Amino acid sequence: MSSALTDLLPHPIVQAPMAGGVSGPELAAAVSEAGGLGFLAAGYKTADGVYQEIKRLRSLTDRPFGVNVFMPQPEYAESGAVEVYAHQLAGEAAWYETELGDPDSGRDDGYDAKLAVLLDDPVPVVSFHFGVPSRQALERLRRAGTFTLVTATTAEEAVAVERAGADAVIAQGVEAGGHQGTHRDVPENDGTGLGLLSLITQIREAVHIPVVAAGGIMRGAQIAAVLAAGASAAQLGTAFLATPESGAPAVHKEALTNPLFVRTELTRAFTGRPARGLVNRFLREHGPYAPAAYPEINHLTSPLRKAAAKAGDAQGMALWAGQGHRLARDLPAGQLVEVLAAELAEARAVFAEGGAR
């Protein structure tokens, strides 16, 4: 493991930044205090909101933590497809007694303002999703003392991450819950994502920077497996989604292990970008017709998702979850880190003995 990365986390356990209010200061602090690396999700927040969360997190822990930032997205040309989808969702708006959102509510998620906050008051770690920052931006963060990571879903994307000057790459397998961090959203690539172990191997042979593995990891033995495959640490999202410190609605947490939700799918139904969630009514009815238009579709469906969550209706929510969701454990986040670390140590002992117990 890279010594710079080792210094940041006693246990090779990273809590994935889950946007939408899930990964807040309480969750990040609990993970960091237990020896993992907690993360705040800056996505869908204002720059001032991010600053306030960083301030709150620092009041809860003096351990290292990270902040995740979404990259600005290119212009989407086919506005007609968004209008057609909006017409299809009119019945949903009537059912939930709300209006559809404005698809033209912004494309850059306040990127420049958030970067300015992170340069003015540096944090230990910053990661990026949906693309690669400029070499200049990464260098400025490095000079500020910040360790940088960028998500990649292919070896080619990982090479771009290394060339830009990031300190490490997050290898996100297709098993991961939530949005795939592809650098370019190309519809013809839908369904071609790589499994995590294959992806780690390909990325390890393509770049020289450390690799953090993400996708479907729920147990310490799986962490041991990705470390054995060449990763320096494991990033877990769904595993922390069910914790008390998570900001996910109770109905979302309960759905992870509810027998009603038996599988996950990658869908564009809620945001216009491929994201893995539990298969529910909304996903089944609208997924096949959702255009590749992020963040337009995300803005459009936002009021619907909020109304469904307020009503406790899991069938209308974006129930983001990885393929390992049935393995979710209702444990405090700090205790979960300790359990994962113990499972990892046991798995490593088994590996060292050369056999299974």
Image (cartoon, grey):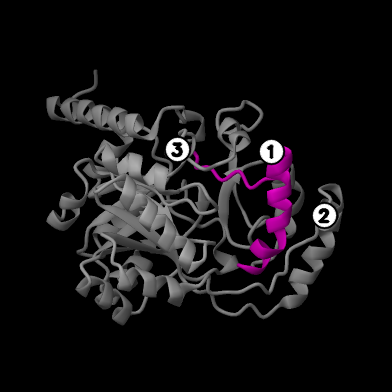
The circle on residue 11 is none
Q: Position of residue 210 (x, y in %)?
A: 22, 58
**What amino acid type is highlighted by mark number 1?**
Ala
Q: CA distance from mark 2 to mark 3?
A: 31 Å
Majority secondary structure of the magenta segment? helix
Identify which residue is drawn at 58% across, 41% down. Answer: 264
From the image, tell me which residue sits under label 3: 245
State which tag comes first along the sequence, 1 or 2: 2
Outermost residue, top side:
357
Relative to 39, residue 218 above or below: above
Identify which residue is drawn at 39% across, 39% down. Answer: 217
Q: Position of residue 188 (x, y in %)?
A: 58, 66
Residue 295 magenta-highlighted: yes
**What amino acid type is highlighted by mark number 2?**
Ala
| Total numbered labels | 3
Region rendered in magenta: 294-323
From the image, tell me which residue sits under label 1: 314
Element type at mark 2: helix
Q: Nearer the viewer, residue 93 or 206?
A: 93
258 left or right, relative to 143: right
The crowd level at tag 1 (other Cα within 10 Å; few <14, some 14-19, many 20+) is many
From the image, tell me which residue sits under label 2: 93
Element type at mark 1: helix
